[in-house]
Each structure stands twice: as structure tokens, then as C-alpha cells.
Image (cartoon, grey):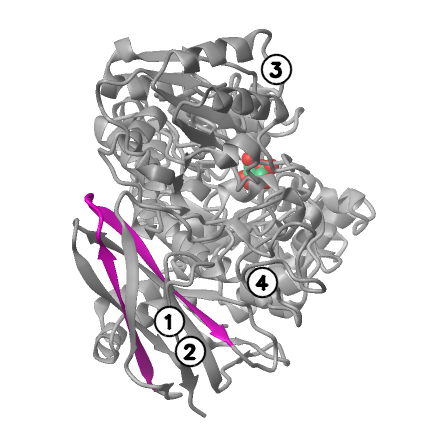
Amino acid sequence: MLDLAISRRAALMGAGAAAAWLASPARALLQAAGQVQVPAFVDQLIARMTLEEKAGQLQIMASAWGGGAALSLNPPGSGSDFSQQVEEARRGLLTGVFNGNGARMARIMQTAAVRESRLKIPLIFAADVIHGHRTIFPVPLAEVASFEPDLARRTAEAAAFEASGAGIDWTFSPMVDVARDQRWGRGVEGGGEDPMLGSLFAAARVRGFQGADLRSDAHLLSCIKHFAAYGAAESGLDYNVANMSMRRLREVYLPPYKAGFDAGALSAMASFNEINGVPSTGSHWLMTDLLRGEWGFKGFVVSDYTGDEEMILGGYAKDGRDAAKLAFLAGVDMSMQSGLYRQHLPGLVKSGEVPETLLNESVRRVLALKAMLGLFDDPFRRIDEKREAARSMLPKTRALAREAGRKAIVLLKNDGDLLPLPRSGKRIAVIGPFAAGAHDLVGPWVVYGDDSKAIDLATGVRNVVGPASVTVTQGSGVAEPLPGGIEQAVAAARGADIVLLAIGESYDMSGEAQSRTEIVVPEPQQQLAEAVAAVGKPMVVVLKHGRALALEGAVADAPAILATWFLGTETGNAIADVLFGAYGPSARLPASFPWKSGQEPYYYAHKPTGRPNPPGELQPYKAHFRGIPNSARYPFGHGLTYGKIAYSGLALSGPSLPMNGSIQISATVTNSGARAAEEVVQLYIHDRVASITRPVRELKAFRKVALAPGQSQTVRFTLTAADLTFYGLQDRPVIEPGTFDVWVAPSAEAEGVHGTFELAA
Ligand code: BGC
């Protein structure tokens, strides 16, 4: 398996620097990442445990603490009585709970476990800390739009700081599933459509959550999920099957998981879906042969929420006992929420169907991680009510949320340089269901965050231009018209100089189980847009969304469009920073916006087919849907700045790339505009002829460069033969000589500057 993280690092350096890297302490640290130390007392403890206590260490349940916000995020019926759960902790029948409510709950349960249980094994507290804890950062997909992995490392670290103050040891994050079908609602939690970009963010988030030492009371154990290929759900229907060649699995879907493990993540969550007929949760090939055998993973695997039990309705397990046996023997160490492991593992061991040595092995992994988290030294190290409050929503964390927010906003369109807006002298009408109000700000998969503590768009705008020149009109509901709403909105637009139209998806239209057949702005809002646009005032569309959308009519035709996703606590301020030019937009799409929903799954790195439609007019008997080109409206990598950027002067260090060498590729980017800009310069390649057909383009490197007005910069990249690896006929990595196209371009479908080179035999 090609190690993308390392090869990318090497590719971004010259040969000398690469050699220095190989010998560096940083590399040694990276190699130590992902290793598990098992203290001697762990085996002594296991020797004293009953089968029931062992199975208990492999069972995690949703917290039953009253008011635990997360209970509503999972299917109903998850919570049992809290006192009963405390009793289970006392009896050693629980390894821990998840999505409970803060340090107070954790103290009660931990006290029962370490003071009153027979073996005094500490509990582990987990939570879905997905994009922030109390301070909410942009949804993960939005953060990827920054094309700045280190930003994700910083927000993960800040989230860990808040969460670890609140009794949490373990986050069920990052979610790194590649998502190429925008109908699937969970793309919002992940790294977008590109495996290379997704891998960089996966690794960055793991480093942020875990830090250098898991014992730190400011860090958390990270969990790579959902292993594997959950994002490949057929037709974008959540939980649906993933069916694909081994080559596609290895080349497109697996790299971000691998990157997360290589960065040191020591837990993994099995995905709900099946792959080629075998549920991930029951797949020995996936959980043992690949993960532990081939990749050398040393941590533990947890099922997803009742994922083991779901193999019954999925047609793979006969009953609960069979499901527990299949999941456990496949290599899933811990069961989440079904209760099947503690119910059946002791019996399965007694009957000889599950070897006790395997049970001990899983318990050993879990206890070793508890030890690495420092829980045996001090079970209360992350449980401190005062610290919980003292770390919550600090000004520096909110400032980071604002920085992350503005860096995630993609300027899709800016005809006539409508943006940035003047900071004074204009009457502004903010119109739409997302114009104002404490709703839909923090986005999906937030357990502990709070819309009411977040800044809405209207407030952000007023903060810049003052209240007097701003009117706010709802105009429409999200999915229902508002009686008289359009008339009021039209009147507001007439009375204004500029319209900000805040429309799109509500927070619950993406996320788990939120698949859509039409990825459009809901009809009542589209009608609002048509009516407001007809007034004829300059209009900026401020989209709220958890996925790429197919824009239509007046929305698509608006002179300026901002993709603003769900930005979290600092939503309004971050958007206002971009609207009024305090910050020049620098983000790029991590997922392509198609022309129409029916194009999905649409992704830039598709294959050419034998009948590609040449650029321009649609031609008969060429690959396209009726009426639209086989391209995106706004492709992966697209995003404008407030500068005027031109690409020129592609230069290659030679005509060919030797098998054991490298080639330098450079291009000049110039900002001839009057405003500073940050440009994300992207390098794509295409392998013209290969034994396996190759995508029309593949992202191989990118660099964000700051350009003052009038400034030019030459951006240099280095490619090695390893960067041209793909999975060949034998499902093994191969590198084949031949001709390669190379583009240095502002998006996956922009021409930029183009050249070719040969990979020499
Ligand atoms: C989701 C996981 C999540 C788990 C625990 C499941 O429904 O698929 O991503 O971590 O619930 O809340």
C-alpha cells in the first residue's frame, strides 16, 4: 500500500531534504505513533478477571444520564436507567459510556467503577466530538475547504482541550469516509471526494486530538471511522451496500483510514455497511487480515452503534449470539450499544466457539489503551467540573472558530466584483430562513454545542455596518412557504441597496440517515429567490448546506454566491469577515457542485470513457446527460479570491521523470487585481495510457500562496515516480512508464497551465 502521507511529504521536498527527513527525529516520532505499550499489570489483571468481567470490558453503552443531549442523536430507546448503569459499572459489566453529559456524570460513574467494583478498573468516557465540543467549529467538510490541514489539527486540538476538561477520554472522530455521491448526507462529517486531500485532513485531525502523549489531560484518544467505505453507499442511501472492485477500494476509499492510523490513531470504528456482500462488522479480511495484518494496527476496534446486531436484519447473522460471534471473530474488539458482547461472549467462550485467548487479546488491547490514557494512574485525570467550566468557550477558542469559519467559505461566483461589499453607505436586506435566529448555525453532529451561543448572519452583518442600515426578513420556511413571506421579502429588497439571500439546507437535512434524492435548494426557498432576484437589486446568495448542491434558476444566476456550509459558533462574524473584505476568501470546494442532481455520483477524478465530449458544445453519441456537459458547475478545487489571478509559465525540470528520480514542476501565479489574495495552487496529473484506465485528473499536490496586489510568485512542486503509483491488474501497486499530462491549475476542471512529461522505463 502506498503511504500517501509520506510520499506527499517527500514529493514536496527536494531529494536532499527527503534524505534529511528520513534521518530526522520527527520521522522517528511518526514511526513511534500508533505503537501500544502494555504494562505488566494488565496481564495480571486479566488473569484475575471472570469471563463476565472480560466481556464487560468489551461493551460500551450510550450514557443514560438524564438530559444527556446525545440520547436524541441516536435511535430512541438507547438510554436505560442511569442508576442501573452505575450498578453495571459497579459490577464490572461496562467498559465505559458515550455521549454522557460532562464531568459531573463521569465522576459519579467513575467513582462507582474505581471505588466499588471488584477489580477497580477505570471506565473510559467517549463522545462524538466531531467539530468542536462547546465551541463549535465548521463542519468537517467545510474545514477541508480551507485546504489547510494544519487548521484542522488546531481545531481538533482545541476541541480536545474543551472535551478533555469535561470528562471525555475518547472521541469517535475523525470520520474519514471518502464521499463521492452528494445524495449521501454524511459527507458533511468527512473529508470530501478526494482521497489525497482527505488523507491529509485525517492525519491532521488525529494529531490534533491525540497530541504527542495520550496521557495528557488536554488530549483524547481518536477513532478512525467508519471502517470501511461507508461513504460508498450505493445511490447515496445511508447504510446501503458498498459494492466495488478491490482496486477502487484500495485506491480511493482506504487511503484516508490508513493515513489516520499512520498518524497514530489507536482506535477504529467498524462501518455499518457491507462491502461486496460481507458486512464490515463481520469481515475478518477487513478487521484482521488488512487492518492488523497488512497495516500493523495495534489499537482496538469498536462496532458502530448496534452494528453487530444489525448483521441479523442484514442477512448475515442468524441471531444475536451468532452476530456477537461473527463480529468478535472478525476482529471487532468492542461492541457499541447492542449489549450482545456481554450477553453472549462468556457463553461463546464456554462452548469453545470463541477461544479465550482471543477474548484476552481484545481485553488486553482495551486495558492497554486505558493505561496509555493514564486512567489507571488517575481515573479522574479528565474529570474536573471546575476545569470543565474554565476551558469552555474561551475567547481564544472562539477566535479560532472565527478563523476556521472564514477560511472555510468558498466564493463560488463574483460577477462584476460585487464582493466585497462597502462597509458603510448602503442599506442591506438580509433575507431568508437562515438570515437570523439561533438555529442551524452549529450544524449536524453536535452533542454539546449550542445554537443559542452562536452568532447568526444578521448579527455578524450588524457588527460590521451597524444596526441602522440592516433589515431582516425571513421570507420563507426551510421546506414550507411562509404566508406573506415572499411579499415581505420583495418589499425589503425594494427598500435596500444590496440583498443578502441566506438560503439552503437546514442542519438536519444532512448528517446520519439524511440522504436526499434532489440535492437542490428546497422549492419554497427557490421561489423566494426568484421573487427577490426579480426586484433587480445586487444580490449575494449566502448558501447554508452540508453537501454540494445543484444550484438552479435565480440562485445559480445571482452575481455573487458564497458557499458557507455550517460554520459553528462564529458563523455570522466569519461570513461578515468575507462579505465586507476583512478577510479575502481562500477556500476551495472539497466536493464538486454538479449541474443537476441526476449526475450524482459526480466526482472530478472520473474516467474518460471512450467517447468523451470535447470541451464546448455537446456532441451526439458522446458521454453526457441530455442538456448538460459531463462536468461540474463548480468543480472540486474551485474557489475565487478578491484578487485577479492568472497562471502562466509552466516549466518542467526536464522532459522526463526517471524511475528513481524526480521531476520539478513550476508555474507562475500573478495577482493583477487591486486586492490581496490567497490562491490555492493545485497540481493534477493524468496518465494517458495504462494497463488500467486512469482518471481524467488526479490531485497530487497543492500549495496556498499569499499574493499582494501586483505580485507574482513561482510555485514549485516535485513529483517522484511513487506519486504515479496505481493499483494494477494484480491489485498490487504498480508504476508504469508512459506519457503523463500535468496541470497547475486553480481547480480540477480549469485548464490553468498544462504540459506533459514521460515517465522513463
Ligand atoms: C454513528 C457514529 C457515532 C455513533 C455514536 C452512530 O449512529 O454512525 O458515527 O459515532 O452513532 O454516537
Label 4 element class: loop
Judging from the image, what secondary structure is the residue with disc 2 in?
helix
Give the magenta-colored segment's residue range: 661-687
Q: Which residue is mark 4?
A: 606
Amino acid identity at mark 1: Ser
- Sort mark 3 into few (<14), some (14-19) or many (20+) by Cα contacts within 10 Å: some
Label pair 1/3, CB-CB below 8 angstroms: no
Vertical comparison of 388 with 246: above or below = above
Closer to us: mark 3 or mark 4? 3
* Badge 2 density bin: few <14, some 14–19, many ≥20, Cα 10 Å: many
Instruction: Identify the amino acid type marked 4.
Output: His
Q: The disc labelled 3 sits on which kind of residue?
A: Pro
Residue hosting label 3: 481
Q: How many marks?
A: 4
Q: Which residue is mark 1?
A: 7
Drawn side of residue 612 relative to residue 638, left or right:
right
Q: Residue at x 36, y 29 (%)?
A: 166
Distance of label 2 from label 3 (alpha carbons): 55 Å
Q: In the image, which is nearer the foreground, mark 1 or mark 4?
A: 4
Can you identify the residue that label 2 sits on? 722
In the depicted view, which residue is nearer to us: 636 or 629? 629
